[in-house]
Structure formats: C-alpha cells, structure tokens
Amino acid sequence: MRVLTWNLYHGRTVPPSGRSLLNEFAAALDGWRWDVALLQEVPPWWPPMLAQAAGAQQRTQLTSRNWLLPLRRAISDRNPDILKSNGGGCNAILVRGRILDHRAEQLRRAPEARWVHGVRLAAGWVVNVHSHNHPEALALADTQKAIAAARAWAGGPPLVFGGDINLKKPPAFPGLLHVGGNHVDHLFTDGRPAAGKREVLDRGTLSDHPPVAVTLA
C-alpha cells in the first residue's frame, strides 16, 4: 500500500495565483502513484471531482468555516485568495479501491472545529487528521484524541494514521511507528514498516505544503 498525505492550502498557490486551481490539483493527484491519499484544507466541493479525476472513491468530513458555504464557494471558485481559509474547509480521503466503512469524530469545537475521520479498507483502517496549530499543546491534544479514535475504530491492527498534525517533531506515540514525514505532515502505522524512504513530491507552486508519500512493506 502506498499512502500520501497532502494539505491543499484551500486550493491556493505560493505565490497567489488569483484563480481557481481545481484542474491543476486534480491533475497532480491523478499523476502521482498512491493507493490512499489523505487530504486536508480541501475546498468542500472539490473531493468528488478530485476523486473522479484520479479514478478513486472518496469520503469527506467538513471541518470549519463552512456556514454560508454557497456564498463562500461562489467567491472562492473565482479567486480563492480573496477569502483564503475562510472559503470553507474539509478533510478528504481518496482511495483507489473499495471503501468498506467511514467514520468521523470531532476533536474540538473551539477555537475552531477539528475532526478526525477514517475509512476501512480490505487491508485495514486508514485515518486522516488535521490537528489544531499554535500552541503545540493543542496540536498534541488533538493528535492524541485522533489516535485514540483511530484505535477504537480499528479494534487492532492493521492501522495507518496520518495527516497534518501541526507538530514538526512528533513525539513517540506508544504503539505507533513513524514511517515518514516532512515539517508538520506525518504518517504512522501500528508496526508495519515502510518499504523504503519517504518521498516529498514536487507539486510546483501548488499549496504551501509539499505532499509526502510512503510505500508500506
């Protein structure tokens, strides 16, 4: 199994492009090799189109800043740099295969909503999170709650856990093996090792986070 994690920066580029980049993000995801893609800070209307472009199934969890979403979408579809993160947000899991189950749990309501969600595949559970940032104590608390939820859903191995945990140097989480990461984006398993080194993929100017991919043994 090859797993990718990527924070999409609400569909924006660095430097700002001033236009919708759905096609560019979709083409990038379609062009990379992966079985499961864990995505954060996704415009909420994008996941079905990203999945279709990549030949995948998808499951979505709305996060924060989504009230009056039709208005936010109308603005951000034209120029995502106007509202930036206020264009609405969700986390999404794309799977090039069959999804057997999907679950989600809210981690916090304030200062903004944070969620963990996961999918059950034939190979086990894969769980996606975007933890709070600043201070790191909140990021750590969210990540620990998300791990607890993931373990409850999985009920035992195998489990893959990852996303944007907003911790540059994650602590050793008991029972989890860190198989790869870059900056605040990390991937863990419940013991299954990586088949090689993690890869930081070239995404050009898309997002302020590069994608991280790991092939599991």
Image (spheres, helix red, strand yellow):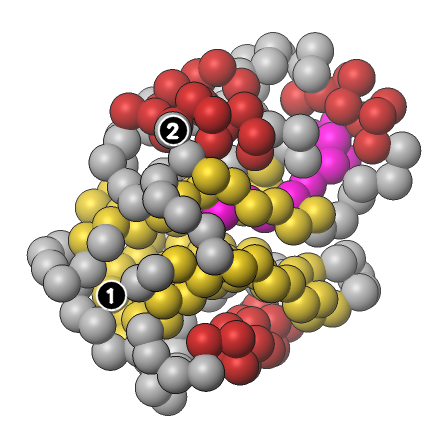
Instruction: Rate crowding at label 2 as few (under 14), some (14 to 19) or many (20 or more) other CA atoms within 10 Å.
Output: some
**Residue receiving disc 2:** 55
Under circle 1, the secondary element is strand
Report the side of 189 relative to 42 (left or right): left
Q: Residue 149 at what x, y percent from top left?
A: 57, 76
Report the side of 33 relative to 205 (left or right): left
Q: In percent of the image, x 38 and y 29: which residue is there?
A: 55
Q: Quadrant of the N terminus?
A: bottom left
Q: In percent of the image, x 80 and y 41: which residue is there?
A: 66
Q: Residue 102 at what x, y percent from top left?
A: 56, 58
Q: In percent of the image, x 45 and y 62: which residue is there?
A: 120
Under circle 2, the secondary element is loop
Residue type at mark 2 is Gly
Q: Nearer the viewer, residue 123 or 30?
A: 123
Q: Earlier in the sequence, mark 2 or mark 1?
A: 2
Q: Which residues are magenta?
A: 82-93
Does the stretch in magenta take in 78? no
**Residue 147 seen in this snapshot:** no
**Residue 54 seen in this snapshot:** yes
Front of the two marks 2 and 1? 2
Instruction: Rate crowding at label 1 as few (under 14), some (14 to 19) or many (20 or more) other CA atoms within 10 Å.
Output: many
Q: What mark, if any, has residue 87 been given in the picture?
A: none
Q: Is residue 5 above or below residue 76?
A: below
Q: Quadrant of residue 184?
A: bottom left
Q: Residue 68 at what x, y percent from top left?
A: 89, 33
**Residue receiving disc 1:** 179
Query: Residues under labels 2 and 1: Cα distance?
Result: 26 Å
Q: Residue 161 at what x, y percent from top left?
A: 41, 66
Residue type at mark 1 is Val
Q: Quadrant of residue 81?
A: top right
Q: Quadrant of the C terminus?
A: bottom left
Q: Nearer the viewer, residue 198 or 169?
A: 198
